[in-house]
């Protein structure tokens, strides 16, 4: 990649490499290390996003209602959701349950553009009020602790400045918590 590559080109290359090297899609022994190195390289190349007081607002969102618990199923308790850093959350659920929650959350944020259950990858197109329509790519990494790391990558689809990753990650965290507070329908 050229040294003077624009941020959109860098993020596109990052996503392409992520889809190839993520531990859930690659059998390579160093897949997790490569994924961490890719994320570190992306952060180094693009620099840290400016801090944000509030997450950007979401316009519209999907009109499709999220999947809910069926009658007779056990009520869901709110999982612990913690910010690890500006682009990573830790959710106190195994990866398969975390992905189910994120699919429900994705319906509230926008429209799902890509879902790979096996790889733990989810892409959502989100229309922001004060930022360009963007692709939110979420990838999961289960941990032996029982927690799942949720790494968020944001890329504008219609030009303009990238919404602050930290703000979008916080929006995802708050929406997860809100999803669990909603009564089952």
Image: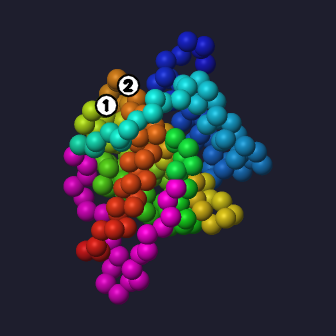
Residue reaching furthest to the right: 29
Classify 105 as above or below 17. Answer: below
Give the label on residue 78, or none.
Answer: none
Which stretch is magenta? 60-82
Q: Which mark is first along the chain, 1 or 2?
A: 1
How far across and how far down the image is residue 2, in percent? 59, 14
Give the spatial CA distance, label 2 vs label 1: 7 Å
Classify 172 as above or below 12. Answer: below
Crowd tier of the residue under label 1, counting other residues whose Cα lies within 10 Å: few below 14, some 14–19, many 20 or above: some
Classify 182 as above or below 133. Answer: below
Left or right of 180: which side holds 26?
Answer: right
Q: Quadrant of the C terminus?
A: bottom left
How far across and how far down the image is residue 121, in percent? 51, 50
Give the label on residue 161, or none.
Answer: 2
Q: Residue at x 55, y 25 (%)?
A: 47
Residue 154 seen: no
Looking at the image, which is closer to me, 96 or 47? 47
| Residues at circles 2 and 1 in contact by the CB criterion of under 8 Å | yes
Left or right of 146: which side holds 169?
Answer: left
Left or right of 30: which side holds 154?
Answer: left
Q: Residue at x 35, y 87 (%)?
A: 72
The residue that mark 1 highlights is 132
Q: Residue at x 55, y 56 (%)?
A: 90
How far across and how far down the image is residue 140, in percent? 56, 53
Q: What is the chief secondary structure element of the magenta stretch? A: loop
Residue 69 drawn in magenta? yes
Kind of element beneath mark 2: loop
How far across and how far down the image is residue 172, in percent? 41, 51
Residue reaching furthest to the bottom: 72
């Amino acid at each position: 990649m050229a040294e003077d590559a624009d941020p959109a080109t860098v993020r596109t290359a990052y996503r392409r490499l992520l889809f190839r090297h993520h531990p859930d899609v690659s059998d390579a022994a160093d897949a997790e290390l490569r994924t961490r190195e890719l994320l570190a390289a992306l952060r180094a190349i693009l620099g840290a996003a400016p801090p944000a007081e509030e997450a950007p607002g979401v316009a519209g969102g999907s009109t499709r209602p999220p999947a809910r618990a069926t009658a007779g199923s056990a009520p869901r308790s709110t999982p612990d959701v913690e910010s690890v850093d500006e682009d990573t959350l830790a959710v106190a659920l195994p990866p398969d349950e975390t992905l189910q929650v994120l699919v429900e959350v994705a319906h509230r944020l926008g429209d799902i553009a890509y879902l790979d259950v096996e790889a733990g990858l989810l892409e959502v197109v989100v229309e922001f009020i004060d930022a360009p329509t963007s692709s939110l790519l979420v990838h999961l990494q289960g941990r032996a602790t029982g927690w799942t790391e949720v790494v968020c990558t944001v890329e504008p689809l219609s030009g303009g400045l990238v919404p602050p990753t930290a703000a979008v990650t916080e929006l995802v965290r708050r929406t997860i918590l809100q999803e669990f507070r909603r009564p089952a329908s």
